[in-house]
Image (cartoon, coloured by chain):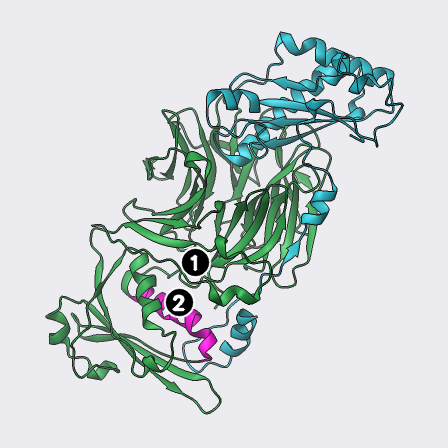
Chain colours: A green, B cyan
């Protein structure tokens, strides 16, 4: 099944943000969908037409883009239902819908809007969700993402990630920008920019800070920057190279790769740059470390076995286990949020592809076909992996579902985009 | 601004609404600082004379095109960290220079071709820079005179995507302090 949804996103909203470059806005194309997408009817909310930017269009776009939903035509249903009790299941079963979303929008005297919706399972004939929000029109987009998250959760069992954000590096000519945008590519904002390379953005678990590597002082230095205040600090600026930051799940530590004592070795440190302690002492390259979700281990890339492979080390015992065995280049491990496996980059016949490894079965599954796929980052619900494709030198971002069925391309015209990092779920 | 508004107002929403960590992503422009660092001169093998360099420019062998010390690049084979024989005279000359100029300081910048992980390539470039430093120290240079850093695949000298470009990018560059 091929859903082709091509959206060139408007960027008029952004004119007031000085450093934001309109070119850096991502648009998302869906190039493949799930085999069994859930048919869902999203009925325009009562009085929604009062506002130029509605809500249901964004909800539908979110759900479609996930590849797990198929939108059912709602035209011609009269009267248009606005509450769960108005939904006639037979009408919607006749259109092959499994679920129907109805709702209303009412202006309040203070200028805000009362937004309500109901999610009805027309097969079982039960109301699965019933929510209300009081928001300003400026919050419609965020509200739509919240509604899509509720629907996704109720229908698939997994948390939705429509309210999350992504970070990425946009390169235009000699200029590098670390960008943060909504998961659908809207609201791109520049966090930092430089005429020297920026790479490896990594979200703190609470989404308030980003660690990254900047070459602005003619060598790789690790910074941590607050997204709240904009304040930043070089937390690892030792003699030699400082790179590959990653946060512990509780946000109290980072692991970084430093060459200060020779070689490329992993160190733990506090987010303020203090408390630097070496993890292992090896004669090999040990880098690209990430904490496992329980915070007890690191997965990392090492050439200790003669080729680049992925290992896991227990922080308590320092016991090391090799995880990858197929091929001679497996790098960039990213643990799944459930702790059951990793996504990583696998080289096969000179092609760099995104693959997953299940710890229990030891099975490797290759999800993409390259040729230059890199920097995978897993959505916080574990369902999608965003990554960079460097084919032909002009980088684009892409995403693939963990089962390999759903594929998206995220394109920013005239911009080389790379190094995507999927942010955490909003705190509830 | 819109997001702060959102964060503030969503808190008073009626039902089914949670707070959100959505924050402004503030803008910091470091392009000025980066430009001032002169970091664009990564390919220091051009022998360009910089007025800040220590010593007399007239007799400075580091910038005399007839001196081997003006040669600053060491190239590597694919997936290799071995300093090839053809670059040993260059490495030896710089080691002797450091030995005879104890105040001189040098950075060796390791680079890789464009293939593979960005972070892993930083480690590979570091290994190449460390290989040349190790040889220089064995030849009498002081450990503290040489800092090794890596640019990984981030600053290719040749922007192409073929073997010729890759060969040019698998490289260490030698840059003296003040250059």
Residue A306 screen position, x and y as percent = 50, 20
Question: Tag 2 or tag 1, which sits nearer the N-term?
Answer: 2
Q: How far across and how far down the image is residue A323, in percent?
A: 43, 33
- Residue B27 figure quarter: bottom right
Q: Residues within 10 Å of mark 1 (few under 14, many from 20)?
A: many
**Residue at the spot 44% in from the left edge and 75% down from the top edge:** B17
B69 relative to A167 in the view: left or right: right
| A340 falls in the magenta region | no
Regarding mark 1 in the picture, which secondary structure is present there?
loop
Q: Is residue A293 visible to the viewer in this orientation of the structure?
A: no
Tell me whether circle 1 and circle 2 mark residues in contact (CB < 8 Å). Answer: yes
Report whether A141 appears left or right of A20: left
Specify the segment rendered in magenta: A134-154
Say which chain tag 1 marks.
A
Check residue A139 for magenta coloring: yes
Query: Total number of numbered labels?
Result: 2
Name the residue beneath numbered marker 1: A183
* Picture coordinates of residue B74, whole percent (x, y): 64, 18
- Residue pictured at 21% horizontal, 84% vertical: A85
Judged from this view, the residue extending furthest toward the bottom is A109
Q: In the orientation shown, which residue stands out farthest toward the right?
A: B56
Q: Secondary structure at mark 2?
A: helix
The residue lying at 67 percent from left, 36 percent from top is B40
Picture residue at 53% right of the left edge, 69% below the top: B3
Q: Which residue is mark 2?
A: A145
Magenta segment's dominant SS is helix
Q: Is residue A82 above or below residue A362?
A: below
Q: Residues within 10 Å of mark 2 (few under 14, many from 20)?
A: many
Residue B47: image location, x then y, percent: 73, 22
Q: Chain of mark 2?
A: A
């Amino acid at each position: 099944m091929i859903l082709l949804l091509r959206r060139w996103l408007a960027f008029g909203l952004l004119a007031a943000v000085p450093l934001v470059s309109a070119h850096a806005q991502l648009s998302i194309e869906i190039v493949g969908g799930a085999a069994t997408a859930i048919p869902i009817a999203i009925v325009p909310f009562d009085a929604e037409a009062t506002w130029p930017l509605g809500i249901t269009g964004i909800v539908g776009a979110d759900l479609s883009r996930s590849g797990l939903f198929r939108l059912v035509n709602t035209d011609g249903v009269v009267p248009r239902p606005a509450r769960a009790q108005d939904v006639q299941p037979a009408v919607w079963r006749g259109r092959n819908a499994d679920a129907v979303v109805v709702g209303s929008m009412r202006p309040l005297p203070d200028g805000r809007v009362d937004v309500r919706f109901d999610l009805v399972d027309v097969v079982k004939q039960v109301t699965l969700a019933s929510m209300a929000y009081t928001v300003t029109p400026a919050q419609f987009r965020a509200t739509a993402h919240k509604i899509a998250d509720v629907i996704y959760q109720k229908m698939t069992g997994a948390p939705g990630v429509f309210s999350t954000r992504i970070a990425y590096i946009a390169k235009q000519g000699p200029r590098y920008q670390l960008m943060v945008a909504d998961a659908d590519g809207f609201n791109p904002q520049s966090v930092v920019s430089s005429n020297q390379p920026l790479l490896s953005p990594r979200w703190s678990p609470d989404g308030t800070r980003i660690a990254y590597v900047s070459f602005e002082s003619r060598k790789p230095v690790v910074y941590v920057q607050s997204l709240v205040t904009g304040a930043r600090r070089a937390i690892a600026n030792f003699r030699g190279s400082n790179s590959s930051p990653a946060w512990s799940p509780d946000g109290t530590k980072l692991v970084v790769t430093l060459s200060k004592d020779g070689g490329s070795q992993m160190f733990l440190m506090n987010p303020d740059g203090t408390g630097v302690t070496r993890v292992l002492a090896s004669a090999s390259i040990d880098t690209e470390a990430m904490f496992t979700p329980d915070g007890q281990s690191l997965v990392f890339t090492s050439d200790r076995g003669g080729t680049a492979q992925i290992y896991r080390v227990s922080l308590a015992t320092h016991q090391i286990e090799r995880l990858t065995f197929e091929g001679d280049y497996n790098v960039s491990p990213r643990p799944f949020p459930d702790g059951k496996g990793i996504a990583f980059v696998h080289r096969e016949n000179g092609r760099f592809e995104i693959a997953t490894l299940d710890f229990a079965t030891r099975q490797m599954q290759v999800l993409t076909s390259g040729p230059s796929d890199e920097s995978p980052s897993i959505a916080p619900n574990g369902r999608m992996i965003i990554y960079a494709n460097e084919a032909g030198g002009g980088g684009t971002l892409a995403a693939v579902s963990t089962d390999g069925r759903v594929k998206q391309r995220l394109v920013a015209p005239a911009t080389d985009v790379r190094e995507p990092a999927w942010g955490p779920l909003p705190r509830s | 601004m819109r997001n702060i508004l959102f964060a503030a107002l969503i808190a008073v929403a009626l039902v089914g609404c949670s707070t959100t960590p959505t924050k402004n992503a503030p803008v910091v422009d470091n392009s000025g600082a980066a430009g001032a660092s002169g970091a664009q001169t990564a390919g220091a093998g051009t022998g360009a004379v910089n007025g800040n360099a220590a010593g007399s420019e007239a007799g400075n062998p580091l910038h005399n095109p007839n001196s081997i010390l003006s040669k600053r690049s060491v190239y590597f084979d694919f997936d290799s960290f071995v300093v090839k024989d053809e670059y040993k005279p260059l490495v030896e000359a710089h080691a002797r220079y450091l030995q005879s100029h104890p105040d001189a300081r040098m950075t060796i910048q390791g680079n890789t071709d464009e293939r593979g992980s960005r972070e892993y390539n930083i480690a590979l470039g570091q290994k190449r820079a460390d290989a040349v430093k190790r040889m220089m120290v064995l030849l009498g240079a002081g450990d503290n005179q040489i800092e090794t850093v890596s640019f990984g695949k981030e600053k290719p000298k040749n922007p192409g995507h073929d073997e010729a470009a890759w060969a040019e990018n698998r490289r260490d560059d030698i840059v003296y302090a003040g250059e």
